[in-house]
Every structure is written in structure tokens, then in C-alpha cells.
Image: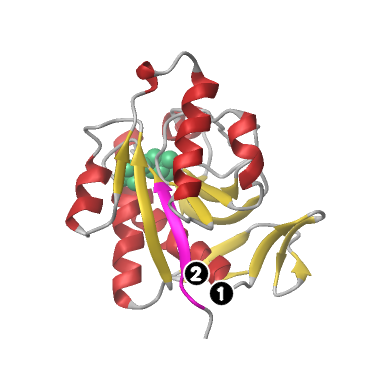
């Protein structure tokens, strides 16, 4: 049997996606071991969730560093020291310096609340509404130095209903995020999905478009 994948999670906020990962591990559907949960905010709910689950935590303040690169290099070095094989960004609200990312190429993923490549950056729900889109969603992608620009692994979709506002969309999307992220990490943990020189492969064949979440399952 493959040993559990050692993962670290970076989060700036409440940590509901982290909670979903912990729940999936506890349910036996996600073979991972959490080496560290780290945050740029000492007050992040994600840190409290990790403490309650007995996972080591780390809070570092960007203000204690001369610049972004110095902060990112120290943070990512400490994550490497934790023994993590994969780094999961789950609501980490910072742009990461390319020099810190380089050693993690192909080993770092992010969950973003839009159907990438649409709406990189902030206020994704508002922007989907303003554009009059018929559907919205969330994406999990490999992280590169380009903000929300790395290869997309999988997406979950919802339709936009008349009368939806930002909060309603966010609330309807979140439970799908909570299924999408563990499902993607499970494929990586099973060594079925990886990022290679020619893009993402699943079961050794190229992924030509993002996987789609249906229920709790991902399919081509
Ligand atoms: C999620 O919507 C995620 O897609 C985005 O930030 C939010 C984090 O929520 N990147 P939580 O902290 O996991 O509850």
C-alpha cells in the first residue's frame, strides 16, 4: 500500500477547506498526513482548526520581514522542513514569490473560486454576476508564478440563478469546493495525477481539459 502523502496547508482565513481535508482524512477517503498548517495571520480560524486536530501550526507575520520575497522564502523553507511532499493553498490570500515557488514546481496546488481562466484574483463571485454569466464554479490548479494561472486540474460548476447575489453564490459554491479539493488531493496521493513537462497526466494519459466534479467523483 502507498504510504500516506505528507501535506502542508497554507490558509489565511476561516479554514473551511482545511476542515474538509481533515474530515476526508478522518473518513478514510484521503490518505494524507498533515505535517503543518501555516498562516500569514495569527488569528486565522484555520490555525485553530489545526490545533484542535493535533496538527502542528505556524503563524508568521509578513511585517516582520524586509520584503515579500524574504517572507515567502522563510515560510516555504519551514514548510519544506516539516517534511511536506505536497503544499495545498486553501484560502491563502497572498501572491507568492517565484523564487519561493520554484522548489515546489508540480507539488503545490491552490483552490480558486472561479472557473479559471475566468476571474483570476479577487471578487470572483461579483465578477461572474456582473458579466451576466450563466454558470460559475471553483477550480483546483497547480500553482505557478502567474497568479491563479497554473494548469487547471479540476472544476466544480454551479448555475447562476436570477436573484443570486455574491453571498448566495459563495454559499452555494463552498460545499462543492469542500468536495473538489479532497477529491483532487486523493488523486495526487494515489499517484494517479501529476504535473509533468508536457502538462497534467491522469493515469499516465494527458489531461486535455479539467476534470469535472459530479457528486464526489471527478471525471474526464
Ligand atoms: C475559498 O472560497 C477558496 O476558494 C478561496 O478562499 C476561500 C477560503 O475559504 N481561495 P476557507 O478559508 O477555506 O473557508
Does the segment drawn in magenta span residue 194? Answer: no
Numbered-mark total: 2
Does the segment drawn in magenta span residue 7? Answer: yes
Outermost front residue: 81
Classify 10 Å Cα crowding around label 2: few (below 14), some (14-19), many (20 and above): many
Secondary structure of the residue carrying tag 2 is: helix
Note whether residue 169 is visible.
no
Q: Position of residue 15 (x, y in %)?
A: 29, 46
Classify 10 Å Cα crowding around label 1: few (below 14), some (14-19), many (20 and above): some
Considering the whole magenta stretch, tell me its main secondary structure.
strand
Q: Position of residue 95 (x, y in %)?
A: 52, 28
Judging by the rendered image, the residue that carries numbered circle 1 is: 190
Write the start and end of the magenta stretch as one range.
3-9
Q: Nearer the viewer, residue 105 or 81?
A: 81
Outermost top residue: 66
- Marking on residue 205: none
Q: Residue at x 31, y 62 (%)?
A: 22
Q: Position of residue 32 (x, y in %)?
A: 42, 68
Q: Residue at x 41, y 54 (%)?
A: 177
Outermost bottom residue: 1
Q: Position of residue 137 (x, y in %)?
A: 49, 48
Contact between marks 1 and 2 (CB within 8 A): the answer is: yes
Q: Does ligand 1 reach within 8 Å of label 2's beta carbon?
A: no
The Cα atoms of the two marked residues, 1 and 2, are separated by: 6 Å
- Colouring scheme applied when the structure was drawn: secondary structure
Judging by the rendered image, the residue that carries numbered circle 2 is: 186
Secondary structure of the residue carrying tag 1 is: loop
Ligand 1: give its quadrant: top left
Q: Residue at x 34, y 48 (%)?
A: 37
Q: Nearer the viewer, residue 80 or 137?
A: 80
Residue 9 is left or right of residue 218, and the answer is left
Amino acid at each position: 500500500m502507498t504510504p500516506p502523502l505528507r501535506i502542508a496547508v497554507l490558509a489565511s482565513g476561516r479554514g473551511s477547506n482545511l476542515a474538509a481535508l481533515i474530515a476526508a482524512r478522518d473518513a478514510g477517503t484521503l490518505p494524507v498526513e498533515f505535517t503543518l498548517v501555516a498562516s500569514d495571520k495569527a488569528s486565522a480560524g484555520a490555525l485553530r482548526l489545526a490545533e484542535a486536530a493535533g496538527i502542528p501550526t505556524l503563524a508568521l507575520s509578513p511585517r516582520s520581514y524586509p520584503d515579500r520575497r524574504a517572507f515567502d522564502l522563510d515560510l516555504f523553507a519551514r514548510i519544506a522542513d516539516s517534511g511536506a511532499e505536497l503544499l495545498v493553498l486553501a484560502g491563502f490570500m497572498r501572491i507568492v514569490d517565484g523564487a519561493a515557488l520554484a522548489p515546489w514546481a508540480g507539488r503545490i496546488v491552490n483552490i480558486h473560486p472561479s472557473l479559471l481562466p475566468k476571474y483570476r484574483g479577487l471578487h470572483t463571485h461579483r465578477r461572474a454576476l456582473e458579466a451576466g454569466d450563466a454558470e460559475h464554479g471553483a477550480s483546483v490548479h497547480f500553482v505557478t508564478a502567474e497568479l491563479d494561472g497554473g494548469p487547471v486540474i479540476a472544476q466544480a460548476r454551479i448555475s447562476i440563478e436570477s436573484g443570486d447575489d455574491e453571498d448566495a453564490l459563495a454559499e452555494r459554491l463552498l460545499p462543492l469546493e469542500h468536495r473538489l479539493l479532497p477529491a483532487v488531493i486523493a488523486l495526487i496521493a494515489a499517484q494517479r495525477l501529476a504535473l509533468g513537462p508536457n502538462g497534467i497526466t491522469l493515469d499516465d494519459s494527458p489531461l486535455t481539459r479539467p476534470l469535472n466534479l459530479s457528486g464526489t467523483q471527478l471525471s474526464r
